Image (cartoon, rainbow, N blue to C red):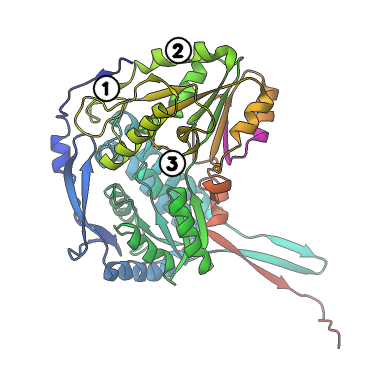
Amino acid sequence: MNCVYLSKHPSGATKAMQNAQPTASHFINGAYVEDTDGAPIECIYPATGKVIATLHEATPAIVDQALSAAKAGQKIWAAMTGTERGRILRRAADIIRDRNRELSVLETLDTGKPLQETLVADATSGADALEYFGGLAGSITGEHIQLGQDWVYTIREPLGVCVGIGAWNYPTQIACWKGAPALACGNSMVFKPSETTPLCALKIAEILHEAGLPAGVYNVVQGRGAVGASLVIDPRVSKVSLTGSVPTGRKVYAAAAERMKHVTMELGGKSPLIIFEDADIDNAVSGAILGNFYSSGQVCSNGTRVFVQKDIKKAFLKRLKERLEGAVMGDPLDEATNFGPMVSADQMNIVLGYINKGTEEGATLVAGGKMADLDGFFVEPTVFADVTDGMTIAREEIFGPVMAVFDFETEEEVMARANDTEFGLAAGVFTNDLTRAHRVVAGFEAGTCYINTYNLAPVEAPFGGSKASGVGRENSKEAINHYSEVKTVYVAMTPVESQF
């Protein structure tokens, strides 16, 4: 594969990296807060491997301060009308759009994703969430149920203090995806970003309060797993929303369930992408690229098991190899770059380990398969063919740019194989037979499905998985149900009857 390599030594990041250090590690009660007693957290720019900022993990005192602020701020926020809350969320969305480039550069420094990508996919999608839920906030109401002369009315109430725990692949987006519906319903939030990408959520908190959010309503604390665990089990917390791996999700879900907390779990996947012989080859290749190599493959919904009907396998792989020559690796802040590094050295080594496994277990390496000759944590976009269902790369989530291509002959066969996984986050199908397309998505055991496209996640549509890939839904009106609860009030207009 002939990927294009830009300069081996990124230079465009120098000035931006100098400005990456935040005002302080945490944002609590409407202001930046520091406590250097917390263990240091180094933020490393994935394109160079260099430290660009040092923050400090939240101490127990910081966690307590954040939860106390959230408890107090929530009462003030919930007392406002939905229209008033929505106005502030929409104002924050406007500020984010005005500062899109600045926030996109920060996202690139935090994650290593190309600026070409972050300019259109990260802060902008966060703004979409705030605008959408800001628009819904005034419409969150109960209902009237007439029962003869009596009636029942319902009140939709906020849950209270919500905890959001973010992943490192979309730090700005996730901070907004969790914050926007929570705030629209009248809750407050304490958000813990991934320790790998600690920078972006601080800016979201700052902008929300600049837009008029009362102090304490959106707080950010930094930390590793122990900090997240302390937030999950705290009795002041009513709801936990996690984006992360299945093993982490199981631990958080169990801890929350023990205390009867509401949860949303958006976890990992090993999603199937089925390409039938009548599919448009170029569209199918585009879908497979989006489902495997966007964000350097670090997307939970990725369709990493690509099932190609035998008659078109050769043509599909030929076109895929040609298209991979358009991958441009190099300085992520150069807008000509369209393929960035892994988020960390650890993640790069995990991915390289899976690539070695694929070769050892007999898959055919079609493209890529090694580190790029660049500074930082770059792995070439990698494609394996002749993958069988029992191989490690077919069963386990890799979270990197590794596509596994499988052969299949019949629809019945491929559906059984597609669903033979513990995961159920996403699934997709490419075919020009619309009857078959709808039949296939009806048969998928997955929460988010695609026909003739892949990996689109507009805020208007519910997003989430089934089976081990999670519970609950993010985005859309569905999210309102996960950040509020219903109180039922029975009103009697007639004398009360009793048995004695």
> Which amino acid, by three-letter code, is at mark 1?
Ala
Q: Position of residue 445 (x, y in %)?
A: 62, 39
Kindly identify the residue that appears in the image at 27 percent across and 22 percent down: 336
**Is 143 located above or below residue 272 in the figure?**
below
Q: Earlier in the sequence, mark 3 or mark 1?
A: 3
Q: Please tell me whether mark 3 sits on a helix, a strand or a loop.
A: helix
Query: Residue 412: x percent and y percent?
Result: 69, 27
Near mark 1 (Cα within 10 A), the count class, few <14, some 14-19 or many ≥20, is some
Q: Residues within 10 Å of mark 2 (few under 14, many from 20)?
A: some
> Would residue 304 appear left or right of 139 to someone viewing this image?
left
| 391 or 176, nearer to the observer | 391
Height in image: 465 above or below 263? above
Inter-mark Cα distance, 2 to 1? 22 Å
Tell me where the magenta segment starts and ends, as one range: 441-450
Q: Which mark is residue 319?
A: 2
Reading the image, the residue beneath label 3 is 128
Q: Quadrant of the N terminus?
A: top left
**Outermost residue toward the right in this view:** 500
Residue annotated with mark 1: 336
Q: Nearer the viewer, residue 275 or 394?
A: 394
Question: Is 464 placed left or right of 248 in the picture?
Answer: right
Q: Residue 100 appears in which quarter of the rendering?
A: top left
Residue 411 makes an appearance in the image: yes
Question: Considering only order in the chain, which callout, 1 or 2, is on the residue closer to the N terminus?
Answer: 2
